[in-house]
Amino acid sequence: MRFIFILNFLTFIYCAVATAQIPAEFNRSEYVKALKKERADKDKEMLTDEKSPIEDGEKATFSHLNYFKPRTAFRKIATFERYDQAMHFYMKTTTDRLPEYTLYGKVTFRHKGKPFILNVYQNIELMKKPGFEKYLFIPFNDKTNGRETYGGGRFLDITETGEEKLLIDFNKAYNPYCAYNHKYSCPIPPESNNLELKVKAGEKKWHKQQ
């Protein structure tokens, strides 16, 4: 229930909240076990919760969401650079809605020896709500879009910790509500967050035609 509650709360902001922090130590087997449980819990709630974005007509055949297998190579320790003067702007969405965000900073990580950068955003409306002051948002596209993953991009969420390094876990990249149901309004990842690599981690597309 908690997952669906959070997703419903953020439907018109950015659809879900998850945290990403650097663990003190890493145990792969425990990590994979926890990730599979998290995915199974989400599957159950997407099927049974009345606030699920999956349409009733599709629930009869629903068994689980589609994911890449866990890949620890896509757990990235990134350098976090915050901007002294955050730029305010209105982010495009799949509808006429234009939510206000700040360009909060950027994260830099490496994959197969190459550096990649993603901009980090903060939703102005969300940050005013108690308990959400430190939630940050990374919408992104990559070379799997429209093939293995949702064509409208995927999302990552992080928590501001004040540290210079943080964990970006692409295994927890998730689809916006629009991937399941077109009645929702979802942010469109800015072009600056188009990654020139295939992120074969996290959630795959829901419909074959996406």
Image (tube, helix red, strand yellow):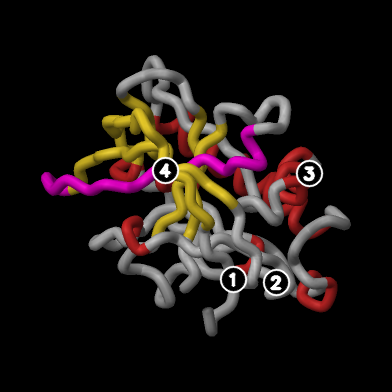
Q: CA distance from mark 4 to mark 2?
A: 31 Å
The location of residue 63, given as percent across then percent down, is 70, 64
Residue hosting label 4: 87
* Residue 33 visible, this orientation: no
* Residue placed furthest toward the bottom: 209
Q: Are marks 2 and 1 in contact (CB under 8 Å)?
A: no
Q: Nearer the viewer, mark 4 or mark 2?
A: 4
Give the amino acid at mark 4: Met
Q: How much space separates mark 3 and mark 4, taking CA atoms?
A: 30 Å
Find disc 3 in the rendering and name its residue: 5
Which of 35 and 112 lies nearest the eye of the viewer? 112
Name which residue type carries label 3: Phe
Q: What kind of residue is marked 1? A: Thr
63, above or below 119, in the image: below
**Residue annotated with mark 1:** 94
- At a point 22% along the width and 48% down the height, the residue shown is 116
Q: If you read the primary sequence from the N terminus, does the residue marked by circle 2 or circle 1 appear first?
A: 1
Q: Which residues are magenta?
A: 112-127
Task: Look at discs 1 and 3 and give the one toward the viewer.
Answer: 1
Task: Tell me the crowding category of disc 2: few under 14, some 14 to 19, or many 20 or more residues within 10 angstroms, Cα based.
Answer: some
The residue that mark 2 highlights is 181
Position of 8 with respect to 40 (left or right) is right
Of labels 4 and 2, earlier in sequence is 4
